[in-house]
Amino acid sequence: MEAKTNLKENAAAVVAASGGSTNAALHLPAIAHECGIACDLFDVAEVFKRTPYIADLKPAGRFVAKDLFEAGGVPLLMKTLLDNGFMHGDCMTVTGYGMAENLKRVAWNSDQEVVRPADRPLTATGGVVGLRGNLAPEGAIVKVAGMDNLQLSNAGRRGNRGDRRLSRGIFGNMPSRSDRRATAPSPTRAGRPRRRAMRISEHILSVALFGFGLGLTTAYAFDGTKSPANIAPPVVGGVAVAPEGAGQSLGVGVGAVRPDAFQAFQTGAQALRAGDTKAALDALDYAARNGEVAALWKLGRMYADGDGVKQNHLRAFDYFRTLADSHADETPGTRPAVFVAKAFVAIGGYYLIGIPNSDVKPDAVHAREMFWYAASYFGDSDAQYRLGRIYLDGQGTAKDPKQAMRWLFTAAGKGQYEAQAVLGAMLFRGQSVPRDAARGLMWLILARDAATPKETWITDLYNSAVKQASEVERNVALVHVEQWIEQSRSGQRTP
């Protein structure tokens, strides 16, 4: 029995030390069950609670799996866990030797930063914690790697069958991502609609929810302020931000905070329009600390642009990084996902040029990773344009005109005018692609119409092409533009 316990604890320790996913709380008990080992969510959570988080991996950290492999891989991580008493060395392995024997020849690599020694961790506990309470009698699991604060709450409201918004749940206007993933129809059709194989127990509460308006948000941003019922609502920017008659507070975590982030964001936006920058900053900061993604994005942009505040690129970078790290797996197409994608693009832009007098150095490879994630996962057109330029210019990767065209064409088809300009110039000149002057001029016309007066490089590309184009090419280009406009009206963006 002790050997079986040690086995499951070793597995959980490796997940915890690497900032592993909430999926471990589902998969490890399932694997243990198949092996005849008793294990549940709280067995896993107990190991996470006492295991240090030492692998600085994305999305909360700086490195990816390839970096971990090059630093020494999982054996390096396991070695420092074993040396510091966080793993059981007597567990038998498939090699026929115990864990300690297998790791005996693993030497610590002091020339890497991916894995920290277990006695100097990123945090003292693992990246996932287990919760239990009246909202989730059989338990809940939440990822806290990279989170600063661990409390969230919301006001309960009663609805009826006719109220579709409330019938989706008391937590906001959208079902949880976990619920959508667990019940999404399989893309494989086999006679009748099927459900994906993995099912999440209806008794396990997913706390990674995002409700529009006054809904729950990911726990990272909550500041842990106590809010008993006899304390008056806080005032932000001269406006009481807690809604009246919101109902009884529902909480997850230790303590509770008032779930009024969206209203605070609205207050901040109104203050900005009224020219009251101080009140706006107070409200937006409150909203950001309480998980409102739009507030995090707005604050980042204000400091990046010097809009009403002293320009501070490092502070802007921190806002964008907080947003991206904590919401990297936001469901594409949702309201928060738009801001998260833009945050990745902003971070990529900073990594391209670096921030003077800071630890953010020029790193084209890291910039490409940021653009690629936002372009591929979120489908963000700005990221697709930036990724296309990176492949075109060979920044952080080898030049690849074919990849560049792929991303530029995708972004241009979504109306990204900078991509339209670059793509149009390439087509008009026949640069790395077969020449199509009329189509190229079409893209340049669309780009010129959308560009700002300061973006003279787009106007220059357009003027140069118009001078070189024949009358026939110009006329055909105008036909393409009319078709584009008509297709845009009908919802078909790509000509």
Image (cartoon, rainbow, N blue to C red):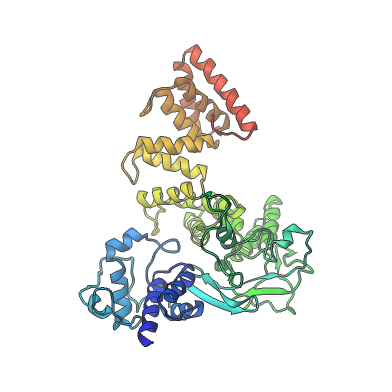
The quadrant the N terminus occupies is bottom left
Q: Residue at x 46, y 67 (%)?
A: 21
> With respect to residue 33, does 412 lie above or below?
above
Query: Hey, which quadrant is residue 93 in on the image?
Result: bottom left
Residue furthest to the bottom? 2
Nearer-the-camera pick, 449 or 216:
216
Does 153 sit above or below residue 214? below
Q: Residue at x 44, y 42 (%)?
A: 386
161 displayed left or right of 150: right
Is residue 351 visible in the rendered image? The answer is: no
Q: Position of residue 263 (x, y in %)?
A: 70, 60
Q: Can you tell which quarter of the image residue 214 is in? A: bottom right
**Residue 304 drawn above or below residue 398:** below
Q: Residue at x 55, y 72 (%)?
A: 149
The quarter of the image holding the C terminus is top right
Q: Is residue 397 toward the left or the right of residue 158 in the image?
A: left
Q: In the rendering, at what x and y percent does residue 283 appear? A: 66, 61
Tell which of 356 and 39 is nearer to you: 39
**Number of numbered discs visible in the structure rendering:** 0
The spot of residue 65 in percent (x, y) is 35, 60
Q: Residue furthest front?
A: 191
Q: Is residue 149 visible?
A: yes
